Amino acid sequence: MTATAGFTSKQEKLPYLRVAIRKLDTLKIFLLILWETKSLDNKKYIAISGKLEEVGRMLGGWHGQVQKQNSPAKAEEK
């Protein structure tokens, strides 16, 4: 999804970014389930969840930037 969003026009990026964020959230839930069932130790959980949080912040920022660029107020400026 992120690769597709990277190569699409500004107007078409938002749906791909939303799906990427949703999939990342699903991955976080599965990771939490693994940790809670003791299938994943604390050290590995912390390492992986930290990376996923960073990716989430990056996707959220990208989503906000694209949403701002596609806002009606921005269109009126052009």
Image: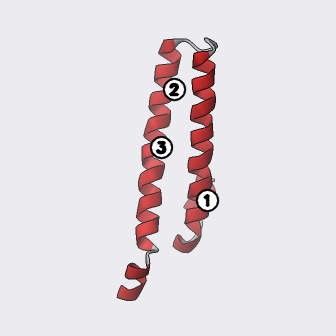
Q: Amino acid at mark 1?
A: Tyr
Residue 48 badge: 2
- Which residue is depicted at the point 47% across and 58% down? 63
| Residue found farthest to the left | 77
Identify the residue position indicated by label 1 in the image: 16
Q: Secondary structure at mark 1?
A: helix
- Which residue is depicted at the point 52% across and 71% down? 10
Q: Nearer the viewer, residue 16 or 37?
A: 37
Mark 2 and 3 residues: CB-CB less than 8 Å, in contact?
no
Q: Amino acid at mark 3?
A: Gly
Which class describes the residues within 10 Å of circle 2: few (<14), some (14-19), or many (20+)? few
Residue 52 badge: none
Residue 28 in which image quadrant: top right
Residue 65 located left or right of residue 21? left
Question: Can you give x and y, in whole percent of width and height, for residue 65 in the image?
Answer: 41, 63
Task: State the CA–CA distance, disc 2 to disc 3.
Answer: 12 Å
Q: Earlier in the sequence, mark 2 or mark 3?
A: 2
